[in-house]
Image: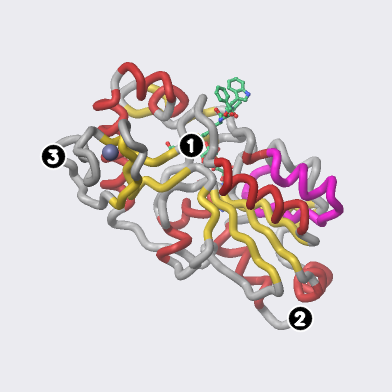
Amino acid sequence: MVLHEVTDELRMMFDRARRVAVLTGAGISAESGVPTFRGGGGSEIWTWRGRPVTELSSAELMRTDPKLVWEWFDYRRGLLSELQPNPGHWEPRFEEFTLITQNIDDLHRAAGSLNVLEVHGNVWRARCLRCASTFEARETPLEDVPLCFVCGAAARPDVVLFGEMLPESIFERAEAAAQRADLFFVIGTSAVVYPAAGLPVAAKQAGARIIEVNPEMTDISFLADYTLLGKAGEILPQFLKERG
Ligand code: BJW
Ligand code: ZN
């Protein structure tokens, strides 16, 4: 069912839910000023210096031109360093609540969420290319490629690029939460990038109701019990209002 605002029926479902899981994507940070990857119903893709994000954020480019990959991410860090979370970065209280994000921007944590499953990593962390140690790397603009504080080798952004595996234990926790949930929110994601886009499918198969929040219909809308067509920062706070 497609709706434009949160109805009393939906608020009742929300109030009665016990185990809630949420999958967020770039759209939840759009109202903070973060560019999304895909626009216009998934057709246009973000490009920088003439290259699409699918090429810039790829394992292939990391192999052939790691310096360019750092420049791309340092450009993104520069954009992010000025930005603040918005009302869409909400964390309601439930018996069990799991926040799964595809975003690397750290804005959920900036909004106060402590337990965030970051399935695509974090742009403010680096990972050693030799010993795999991870460490915080917040300097931007970078003067040089960050070096590992353990072994001194060059590091890379600790993010998951196209063609790379997701961090296994984090994704397993996300899958388990999807399968346990009785209510699953899909917020601000075009739901085209796998395996994250499979989480709402797993939740639905295990019996959860699916609520999507997005100003546009997406690849997952067919699966959703409700698609709330609107901006996350405007729709999500409506769940916390008293029933009328
Ligand atoms: C609002 C809003 C508002 C706007 N409020 N909403 C076929 C061909 C080639 C590859 C594949 C293939 N099939 C599967 C693959 C593999 C690939 C994949 O899925 N590709 C698809 C594109 C087809 N997946 C992978 O490679 C993954 N790994 C993997 O599969 O490992 C196994 C393997 C190993 C070895 C070889 C092959 C496979 C890894 C995927 C990692 C993706 N990482 C990225 C980049 C991270 C770093 C970075 O940030 O640069 O993650 S890609 C990019 O997309 C980023 C995002 O997290 C991810 C999802 O995007 P998201 O969040 O959905 O954003 P958008 O922009 O797409 O959507 C925004 C939405 O918000 C829109 O719907 C708007 O309407 C909405 N919106 N304003 C609410 N105010
Ligand atoms: Zn190292």
| Label 1 – label 2 distance at C-alpha | 36 Å
Indicate the amino acid at tag 3. Glu
Determine if the magenta segment contains residue 158. Answer: no
Please provide percent x and percent y for residue 1.
83, 52
- Whether 30 is drawn above or below 115: the answer is above
Question: For numbered disc 3, what is the local secondary structure?
Answer: loop
Measure the C-alpha gap from mark 1 to mark 3.
Answer: 26 Å
Local secondary structure at mark 2: loop
Q: From the viewer's perspective, tell me whether residue 130 is left or right of residue 211.
A: left
- Magenta span contains residue 206: yes
Q: Which residue type does callout 2 highlight?
A: Arg
Q: Which mark is residue 37?
A: 1
Q: Classify mark 3 as within 8 Å of ligand 2 or not, answering yes or no.
A: no
The amino acid sitting under disc 1 is Phe
Residue segment shown in magenta: 198-217
Image side of residue 154 versus residue 190, left or right: left
Given residues 226 and 108, the one toward you in this image is 108
The image position of residue 127, as x and y in percent, is 34, 40
Label 1 environment density (alpha carbons within 10 Å; few <14, some 14–19, many ≥20)? some
Q: Nearest the camera: 153 or 118?
A: 153
Of the numbered discs in the image, which one, if any, rests on residue 143?
Answer: 3
Residue 88 occupies which quadrant of the picture?
bottom right
Residue at figure coordinates x 80%, y 43% from the top left:
223
